[in-house]
């Protein structure tokens, strides 16, 4: 699935920041991986590399045979739209759109016709247990329900990889557990590869594999 080779990311400004340092990493098809580490250690930068949201200063980020670091901007946009789903700590829902309309925004770049978009979006909401809230605005939903909408939006295009950045960071403990259980069910049923950044060790322990990143260097967690 993923093969990272000697990946380095350096930010230059008033001072030079080595966010990633010579990272070598393999992530296999269907793995559920948690990434932990201190603030500023490189967790979000690594996730951005995996998602093609940023390019490394040097090295290779290969996903299913394509080096994301070397794709053209157009090809990279298409790869993200087709293969990658994203879930963030802040749900990033459009407040004036209903739940089903928010989910459907992920299908617009793929040119899916409106009727098919609506059908698939409703099915995605049903898969996360929110079919009956399809016509509700984000402001009418709880935090956990909004995160479920965000997960449905990530999954509606049927990606092979789901990347999650602190997906339970804004949730109470009970709702956190519900969201993690949902991700586990989707992982098992759909055969997704899931890579999740989390500060919460209780969440990380649920993963199949745990990585730690500190000072831009990745290691396997015990």
Image (cartoon, rainbow, N blue to C red):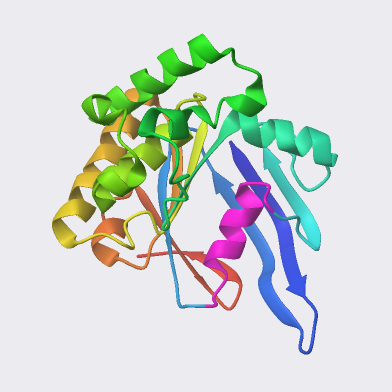
Numbered range of the magenta stretch:
40-53
Q: Quadrant of the C terminus?
A: bottom left
Seen from the viewer's position, the closer of residues 169 and 183 is 169
Q: Is residue 65 visible?
A: no
Q: Quadrant of residue 73?
A: top right
Q: Which residue is painted at 76% across and 50% down in the image?
A: 60
List x then y, in percent, for residue 209: 38, 51
Q: Nearer the viewer, residue 220 or 71?
A: 71
* Residue 194 screen position, x and y as percent: 44, 42
User: Eyeballing the image, is 144 above or below 118?
Assistant: below
Residue 157 is left or right of residue 183, and the answer is: right
Which of the pair 176/21 is nearer the observer?
176
Report how many numbered discs are placed on residues in the image.
0
**Residue 207 on image: x %, y %:** 32, 50
Residue 214 within the magenta-colored segment of the rendering: no
Camera-side residue of 127 and 94: 94
Q: Is residue 171 above or below residue 27?
A: below
Residue 50 is a magenta residue: yes
Write the residue at 71% across / 55% down.
54
Taking the spot 26% from the left edge, 44% from the top edge, the residue there is: 140
Residue at image location 73% in from the left, 65% down from the top: 8
Tell me if residue 31 can be seen: yes
User: Where residue 13 sits: x, y (%)?
Assistant: 80, 83
Residue at the far left in the pictured view: 174
Q: Determine whether, in the image, residue 127 is placed left or right of residue 175.
A: right
């Amino acid at each position: 699935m993923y093969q990272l080779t000697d990946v380095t990311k350096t930010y230059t400004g008033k001072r030079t920041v080595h966010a990633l340092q010579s990272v070598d990493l393999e992530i296999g098809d269907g793995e559920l991986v948690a990434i932990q580490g201190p603030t500023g250690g490189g967790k979000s930068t690594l996730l951005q590399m995996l998602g093609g949201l940023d390019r490394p200063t040097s090295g290779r980020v290969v996903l299913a045979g394509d080096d994301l670091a070397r794709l053209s901007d157009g090809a990279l946009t298409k790869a993200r739209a087709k293969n990658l789903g994203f879930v963030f700590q802040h749900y990033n829902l459009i407040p004036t759109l209903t739940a089903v309309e928010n989910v459907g925004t992920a299908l617009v770049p793929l040119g899916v016709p409106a009727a098919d978009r609506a059908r698939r979006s409703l099915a995605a909401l049903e898969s996360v247990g929110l079919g009956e809230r399809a016509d509700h605005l984000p402001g009418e939903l709880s935090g956990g329900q909004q995160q479920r909408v965000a997960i449905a939006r990530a999954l509606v295009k049927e990606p092979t990889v789901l990347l999650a950045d602190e997906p339970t960071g804004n949730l109470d403990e009970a709702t956190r557990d519900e969201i993690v259980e949902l991700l586990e069910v989707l992982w098992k049923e759909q055969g997704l590869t899931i890579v999740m950044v989390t500060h919460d060790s209780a969440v990380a322990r649920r993963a199949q594999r745990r990585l730690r990143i500190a000072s831009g260097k990745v290691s396997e967690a015990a």
